Amino acid sequence: MDQTKMRILSAAAKLFDIYGYKGTSVRLIAEEAQVNSALISYHFQGKQGVLETLIASYFETLFRLVEEQEARDGDATPFERLEKAVELYVGFQCEHAPITRLIQRELSVESMLAREVLTLYISRWKHGLTRVIENGVATGDFLPVSIDRTVLAVISQMTYPFLQAQMVRQVFDLEPYSEEFALWLQASIMSYLRGCLLPT
């Protein structure tokens, strides 16, 4: 991707995080990126195209990292694979906090874009976690749990702090984008999974 497009995407990510998608104009993005606003239309067909590119890039990078990790950890136990997946997902969300927040905000509103993201990306995320747990149940490593409920609980724990960052800060006195929080959240999720999946 050329430098102009990268500057536009970087500027848009910053502004969307501060002002929200609706509160950010093409003119503001152009000023922040120090480009002519016509270039945004040329490269992305407008603000909606910028948003869609940011979201697609985020998830494509995440799923590429997941595939690379799965290739490396093919001999790991189902629980170890789950632990690695949780660590990767949580770490990625913290590392890309502005886009994570943006995506969670967009998914909280009924829209065509939200439906597309849920169909294309969140379903794929669910499928990846489901596959690992199904494998563990099939091999007897995991208890025969309700897989959908378990995956929903895990995804909820992973995403809620990023959707409600202010609440996490003010009520729980935790910084949801810090490395310390990422480690705490990973440990909390794995404690939940250990309790519901592993035989005593």
Image (tube, rainbow, N blue to C red):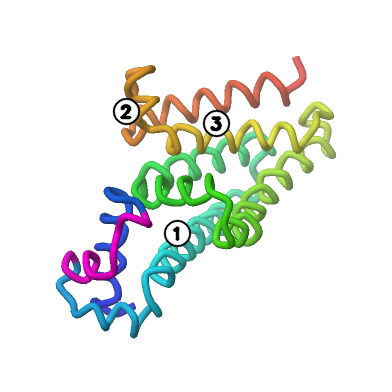
Image location (x, y in percent) of residue 124: 65, 55
> Is residue 71 among the parts visible in the rendering?
no
Cα–Cα gap, marks 3 and 2:
15 Å
Residue lying furthest top in this view? 200
Cα–Cα gap, marks 1 and 2:
22 Å
Crowding around mark 1 (Cα neighbors within 10 Å: few <14, some 14 to 19, many 20+) is some
Residue type at mark 3 is Gln
> Is residue 150 among the parts visible in the rendering?
yes
Q: Nearer the viewer, residue 19 or 68?
A: 19
Q: Which residue is mark 1?
A: 58
Cα–Cα gap, marks 1 and 3:
20 Å
Q: Quadrant where the N terminus lies?
A: bottom left
96 horizontally vs 73: left or right: left
154 horizontally vs 17: left or right: right
Q: Secondary structure at mark 2?
A: loop
Q: Secondary structure at mark 1?
A: helix
Q: Is residue 169 above or below residue 76?
A: above
Image location (x, y in percent) of residue 79: 66, 34
Q: Which residue is mark 2?
A: 175
Crowding around mark 2 (Cα neighbors within 10 Å: few <14, some 14 to 19, many 20+) is some
In the image, the segment drawn in magenta is 21-32
Q: Is residue 9 above or below residue 150?
A: below
First in sequence, mark 3 or 2: give its number: 3
Image location (x, y in percent) of residue 120: 62, 62
Q: Which residue is mark 3?
A: 157
